[in-house]
Image (cartoon, rainbow, N blue to C red):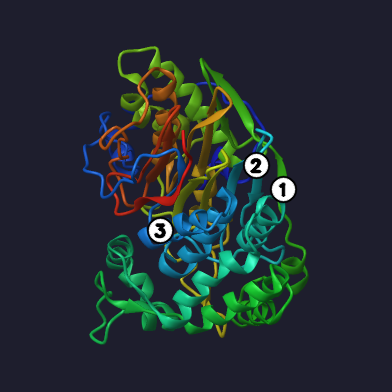
Amino acid sequence: MLSRRFLALAAAPALMLAGCQTIESMGDHTAATLGLGDASPQSYTASEISQSQRGGLAVADEPLAARMGAGVLTSGGSAVDAVAAMFFTMSVTYPVAAGLGGGGICLVRDASGQVVEFDFLTKAPRAGGGYALPGAVKGFAEMHRLYGALPWQRVVAPAEAYASTGFPVSQALAVRLAAAQNILRLDATLAGEFLDQSGAPLAAGSEAKNVPLGVTLGAIRQGGADAFYKGDAAARIVAYSAAQGGGISAAELAGTSVLQGPARSRGLGSLVMYLPGARTGAGAFSASITDNLSRGLRGTRGAVGSAPLAASQSLAAFGVASLPPDLGSTGFAAVDINGGAASCAVTLNGPFGSAHTAAGTGVVLGMTPSSQAGLASAFLAPVIAISGGQVAMAGAGAGGPAGAAAAIGSVLSAAGGRPLVKRGDLRGTGTAPYDTVNMISCDDISCVALSDPGGHGTGAASEVVVQQ
């Protein structure tokens, strides 16, 4: 049975956490189950790093998406254009963790210097069932309406092309396909897309495509979010849900909304760190992680060494003793040449969400947040840090408590005089590719993008450089 505090965390509490429990008192088995048994993060070699420059940068768990984000920045796009393009691209090239059927949280630093939070998490339908009400398409559409510099069609079209004509399976996706092959076999569409003729998961370099998803993305490109929530795709999703015992209704889909407001800020010496606010479970968990890491920073471990312990303490405070090994989440970020930044973390509430594709749409439906995997939303940790009026860091942890702790720990380390400036400075969570952290770190003259050193993502730079 799930504890009341577990359920409260998943339901987005606005409460202060009191009391902590150490990893030792949780027990070795529980710590190992959560991937937090080693107080010192493992050492990894970063898979790729972007060129240092004070220009546009993008970083993501999936390389095709990161490079698409950098391409959007090269075309004069904003950081919001870049993260929107990365999300839609990953809905095709990394559907294990990002998809039109999921939800998430983003932070945006606008031209005025304000940092705004957008919450578009999945919701459980009133009628219940195993499928989630998706918020992601509406979330990225609303951010683009407010902060996009390029036409909407420009940020959606690349994903549509990948889905319709095919794309090479990246090493990042191949690793996840191998781990989730039994899930793929549950759905004919997923099996047809990602299993070969012998029934084995596709290897890196193989070509995959999802033509129905290309059609859905084409409708979104032409008609915006309404084409997804009120058009043919919506009707197909509702019909499929009803046929499979789900509770998604046309009215609830059409009424999907995005919450927007100021992000939570915290002064850290010369830095101001922004995280999700207290209205979500992610905000409550991030606040707890930050408090626990701050105590570790005053000790001998430092913020990086304290990250696993801080995560375990926060989990214990909410009564979480175990988690699914893969929560189906990912984080990504972009910084543009005008000083804007956007950091996002999204989830399907499990690898490939519900493992069901709505017939005729190519859309993998997210799993209801009422399930145990629904706690994935609590571990979404987009973060932006500002120093001297400029973006100092932008990134996200996702996939589990270790990813959130690694992202926040990176900012606390920078505030303590240990910024991320080169390969190896970013420490992996030790549980990649499921708990990941992706960061962009900037000083007065240059920025560097670092993907999780335990994963297979990448940081990519735009070709536009600001002359100093």
In x, y percent, where is residue 440?
Answer: 43, 39
Residue 202 or 33: which is nearer the viewer?
202
Q: For mark 3, what is the residue?
A: 67
Image mark for residue 259: 1
Q: Residue furthest front?
A: 467
- Relative to 66, say whether 246 is above or below: below
Which residue type carries mark 2?
Answer: Glu
Q: Is residue 424 left or right of residue 242?
A: left
Residue sitting at x 26%, y 45%: 46
Quarter of the image for residue 204 reads bottom left
Q: Residues within 10 Å of mark 3 (few under 14, many from 20)?
A: many
Picture residue at 30% right of the left edge, 13% below the top: 300
x and y percentages locating residue 366 in the rendered image: 54, 64
Which disc number belongs to residue 124? none
User: What residue sits right under mark 2 in the picture?
Assistant: 117
Q: State the CA–CA distance, disc 3 to disc 2.
A: 25 Å
Closer-to-camera residue (416/2): 416
Q: Is residue 411 left or right of residue 283?
A: left
Give the number of the mark in front: 1 or 3: 3
Residue drawn at x 28%, y 49% as measured from the top left:
48
